[in-house]
């Protein structure tokens, strides 16, 4: 086993991996330019990629609290929702997209600050359930606050149908988010999050202000997911509580991150891309049953590849849901051998 | 700066209750700079609870704890660590998924640096110090092994290395020799002596093994049922009738 696979905090990436990533990124940037030459690249396909880039960013943000810090958030889609509604309401009232997007993300970050302080004191599944509860509460507030949010009827945003521009916005933002996660993972801040995940009392005893570190990660994740929500709202040109605040959105993020590799930088990227294309291409055949298929897939991942795709390739830097929750459910994770 | 012989850690009337049970009852004690002090007592006598109170893992119900003359009674554990106190645990707390080296790197000094500072410095900056300490605790051959693969004794040594990483003034070691094979116990004792004599570190040791305590400590406190039963040199307390009775019965 090499030092690299075990030590993401101080590893240098192998050259072949840098080359492969550069090739993928260059191909993604070139794709819209080749629309006229390649039949496969259609407007509809560019839209699909746009959706996937947003999911990559969301899953990476979820992974910051869920995978790096060990706080599995079952209500993370609330930040997406607040970002979407913040941006949507402001644009509905005449704001331009860029300031509305930033304001929406700030709303999400402020919400993370307010909700995170009490909920991040809870551990394991208790935190997860509490966050699910706050997600449902915010959805109902949006539904009844008709004067501002439009209630159940929703809001229509000014149309912006330049799919190529949105493709580039979302691609650039997804790359930005992944770069931030990579940077955090190798920084001292990232090391403190891993320490909290592995042993919070030990981390506190060794001088880490665990409350501040957890809150910071939570707020950063909330802000970045708020940006994604704002982008999504503008692209969709319509928002209502039932399409913005969907429980399955968070479940999908959890599933994507677990499939790719919980607590790793590349895991959410691989997981989001894999599940998005599986859903888009294969699950179209099982329209009525796709949620059942999602559930089954989640069970299979937990049982057979708990460390995800990245873990299958020997990267042991990540974690698994069993390890994160085991200590709170009275089960110690098995000894490393 | 605390001079040799001055009080480094002081507890005044420390009391801790769990419901109706008084786990630590009105205990006074002092650990002076440069000393190695032992804390012994039968099972359930309140040693670890007192340790937890001193390091702020547990809040105390009455009394006061001073470290370097500063009242730390209401401080949080990380604030106490910033002042220069480090501890190990009865149930070993290492980061099992991280390598030996990473465990040391993560245990560096965290003293309220800005987020910007934490983000702009990679975690490799302290690698030289971490490697020195790994060599000191005789784990160089395992530097890249995950902590979860180490034996109990090796984990004890790793935990001591982690406690040393922020260069603390006082180390609280909770049963450092427990579950460790005799060869490694000698290594641990040797390392503690070097740290005390050559580096001026002060120690408070909780231990069951009286030989371990008498080999290292100049002074010992004995607890029983949460109360202070005796204090003196190891030879003195081992002759005390009250101590013999507490350990072996009347």
Image (tube, grey):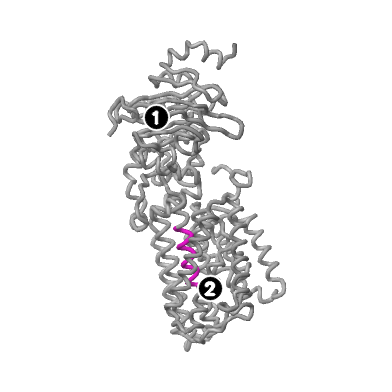
Q: Horizontal and vertical percent for residue A202? A: 47, 42
Q: Read off the residue under disc 1.
A: B10
Query: Which residues, given as a range, are shown in magenta?
Result: A216-229
Q: Horizontal and vertical percent for residue A109? A: 47, 65
Q: Horizontal and vertical percent for residue B70? A: 36, 37
Please name whichever residue, A71 or A143, is drawn nearer the observer in this view of the structure.
A143
The residue sitting at 41% across, 42% down in the picture is B143
Question: Which numbered marker is on residue A52?
Answer: 2
- Vertical placement of residue A232 versus B5, above or below: below
On the same chain, marks 1 and 2? The answer is no
Is residue A37 visible to the viewer in this orientation of the structure? Answer: yes
Please name whichever residue, B118 or A3, is drawn nearer the observer in this view of the structure.
B118
Badge 1 marks a residue whose secondary structure is strand
The residue sitting at 56% across, 24% down in the picture is B43
- Vertical placement of residue B82 versus A240, above or below: above
- For this orientation, the residue located farthest to the bottom is A36
Q: Which chain carries label 2?
A: A
Q: Tell me the distance, in whole angstroms, between the alpha carbons under discs 1 and 2.
A: 59 Å
Q: Is residue A127 left or right of residue B221?
A: right
Quadrant position of the C terminus of chain B in the picture: top right
Q: Horizontal and vertical percent for residue A241? A: 61, 74
Q: Does the magenta stretch include residue B142?
A: no
Q: In this view, does B120 lie to the left or right of A331?
A: left
- Vertical placement of residue B186 versus A46, above or below: above
Please name whichever residue, A63 or B50, is drawn nearer the observer in this view of the structure.
B50
| Count of marks, rendered view | 2
Are the residues tagged 1 and 2 within 8 Å (C-beta)?
A: no
């Amino acid at each position: 086993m090499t030092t690299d696979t075990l030590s993401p905090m101080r590893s240098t990436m192998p050259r072949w991996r840098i080359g492969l990533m550069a090739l993928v990124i260059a191909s993604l940037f070139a794709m819209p330019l080749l629309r006229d030459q390649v039949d496969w690249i259609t407007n509809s396909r560019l839209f699909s990629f746009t959706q996937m880039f947003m999911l990559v960013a969301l899953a990476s943000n979820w992974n910051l609290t869920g995978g790096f810090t060990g706080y599995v958030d079952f209500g993370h889609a609330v930040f997406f929702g607040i970002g979407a509604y913040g941006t949507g309401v402001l644009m509905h009232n005449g704001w331009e997209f860029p300031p509305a997007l930033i304001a929406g993300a700030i709303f999400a970050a402020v919400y993370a600050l307010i909700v995170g302080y009490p909920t991040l004191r809870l551990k394991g599944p208790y935190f997860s359930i509490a966050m699910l509860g706050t997600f449902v509460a915010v959805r109902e507030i949006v539904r009844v606050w008709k004067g501002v949010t439009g209630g159940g009827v929703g809001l229509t945003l000014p149309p912006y149908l330049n799919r190529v521009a949105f493709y580039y916005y979302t691609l650039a933002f997804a790359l930005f988010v992944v770069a931030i996660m990579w940077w955090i993972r190798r920084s001292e801040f990232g090391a403190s999050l891993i320490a909290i995940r592995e042993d919070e009392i030990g981390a506190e005893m060794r001088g880490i202000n665990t409350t501040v570190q957890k809150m910071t990660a939570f707020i950063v994740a909330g802000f970045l997911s708020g940006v994604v929500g704002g982008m999504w709202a503008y692209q969709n040109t319509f928002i209502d509580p039932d399409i913005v605040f969907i429980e399955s959105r968070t479940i999908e993020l959890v599933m994507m991150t677990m499939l790719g590799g919980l607590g790793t930088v590349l895991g959410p990227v691989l997981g989001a891309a894999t599940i998005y294309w599986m859903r888009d291409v294969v699950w179209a055949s099982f329209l009525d049953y796709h949620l059942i298929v999602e559930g089954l897939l989640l069970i299979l991942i937990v049982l057979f590849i708990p460390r995800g795709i990245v873990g299958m390739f020997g990267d042991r830097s990540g974690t698994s849901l069993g390890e994160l929750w085991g200590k709170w459910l009275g089960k110690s994770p098995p000894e490393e051998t | 700066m605390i001079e040799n012989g001055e009080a480094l850690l002081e507890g005044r009337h420390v009391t801790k209750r769990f419901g109706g049970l008084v786990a630590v009852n009105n205990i006074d004690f002092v650990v002076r700079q440069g000393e190695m002090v032992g804390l012994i007592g039968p099972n359930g006598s309140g040693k670890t609870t007192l340790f937890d109170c001193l390091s702020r893992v547990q809040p105390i119900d009455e009394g006061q704890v001073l470290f370097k003359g500063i009242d730390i009674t209401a401080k949080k554990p990380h604030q106490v660590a910033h002042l220069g106190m480090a501890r190990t645990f009865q149930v070993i707390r290492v980061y099992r998924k991280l390598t030996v080296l990473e465990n040391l790197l993560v245990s560096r000094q965290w003293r309220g640096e800005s987020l910007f500072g934490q983000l702009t410095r990679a975690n490799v900056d302290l690698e030289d110090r971490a490697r020195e300490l790994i060599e000191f605790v005789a784990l160089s051959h395992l530097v890249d092994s995950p902590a979860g693969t180490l034996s109990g004794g090796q984990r004890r040594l790793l935990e001591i290395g982690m406690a040393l990483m922020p260069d603390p003034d006082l180390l609280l070691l909770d049963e450092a020799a427990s579950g460790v094979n005799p060869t490694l116990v000698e290594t641990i004792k040797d390392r503690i002596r070097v740290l005390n004599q050559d580096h001026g570190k002060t120690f408070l040791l909780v231990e069951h093994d009286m030989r371990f305590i008498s080999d290292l400590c100049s002074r010992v406190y004995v607890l029983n049922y949460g109360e202070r039963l005796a204090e003196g040199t190891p030879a003195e307390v081992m002759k005390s009738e009250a101590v013999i009775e507490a350990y072996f019965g009347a």
